[in-house]
C-alpha cells in the first residue's frame, strides 16, 4: 500500500480555524490547539448570546413600560391585565416603541385599557 500524504488537507483545516481566530490575543491566534479551543468557545458564547439577547430586550421593554405606566398612576401588572381584559393585543415591543416614539399614543392606549374599570 502506498503512503498517503495529508499535508494539504491539514493545512486547509488549519487555515480555516486560523481565519476564525483572527484577532485573538497571543497563542489563541497562532497555535492550532489553542486556536481550535478558542474558536469552539467563541461559537458557544455567540450562540448563548443570541438566545440571551431576546431575554434582555424583553426585560428592557418591561422596565420602560413599567416606568411609563407608573407616570400615568397605574402599575405594570394591572396595566397588562387591563389590556388583556379589554382585548388590546399590543405586545411589549410595540408598547415600548410607542413610549419612545409617540408618547401621546401610549397615553391613549393606557386610557383605553383602564376605561372599562
Image: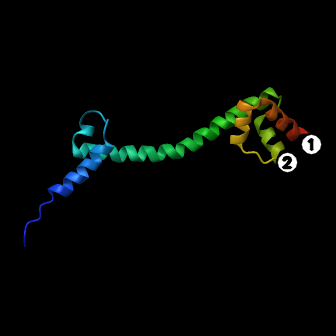
Q: Which residue corresponds to mark 2?
A: 85
Write the residue at 8% across / 66% down.
3
Left/right placement of residue 38 relative to residue 45 reads: left
Q: In the rendering, at what x and y percent does residue 59 appear?
A: 63, 38
Q: In the rendering, at what x and y percent does residue 101 appear?
A: 72, 31
Q: Image quadrant for the N terminus?
A: bottom left
**Near-viewer residue (15 or 76):** 15
Give the colour scheme shown. rainbow
Question: How many discs appear?
Answer: 2
Write the residue at 73% across / 34% down.
65
Q: Image quadrant for the C terminus?
A: top right
- Quadrant of the rendered image containing residue 81: top right
Q: In the rendering, at what x and y percent does residue 39 appear?
A: 33, 45
User: Which circle's residue, 1 or 2, is located before the other in the chain?
Assistant: 2
- Rounded to the nearest angstrom, the CA distance separating label 1 from label 2 is 9 Å
Category of crowding for the residue at label 2, using alpha-carbon neighbours closer than 10 angstroms: few (below 14), some (14–19), many (at least 20)? few
Q: In the rendering, at what x and y percent does residue 56 appear?
A: 58, 39
| SS of the residue under disc 2 | helix
Left/right placement of residue 47 relative to residue 39 reads: right
Label 1 with label 2: CB-CB less than 8 Å: yes
Amino acid at each position: 500500500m502506498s503512503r498517503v500524504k495529508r499535508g494539504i488537507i491539514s493545512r486547509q483545516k488549519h487555515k480555516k480555524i486560523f481565519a476564525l481566530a483572527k484577532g485573538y490575543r497571543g497563542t489563541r491566534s497562532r497555535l492550532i490547539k489553542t486556536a481550535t479551543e478558542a474558536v469552539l468557545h467563541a461559537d458557544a458564547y455567540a450562540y448563548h448570546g443570541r438566545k440571551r439577547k431576546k431575554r434582555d430586550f424583553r426585560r428592557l421593554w418591561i422596565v420602560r413600560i413599567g416606568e411609563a405606566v407608573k407616570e400615568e398612576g397605574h402599575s405594570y401588572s394591572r396595566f397588562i391585565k387591563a389590556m388583556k381584559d379589554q382585548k388590546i393585543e399590543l405586545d411589549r415591543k410595540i408598547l415600548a416603541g410607542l413610549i419612545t416614539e409617540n408618547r401621546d399614543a401610549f397615553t391613549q392606549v393606557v386610557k383605553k385599557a383602564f376605561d372599562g374599570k
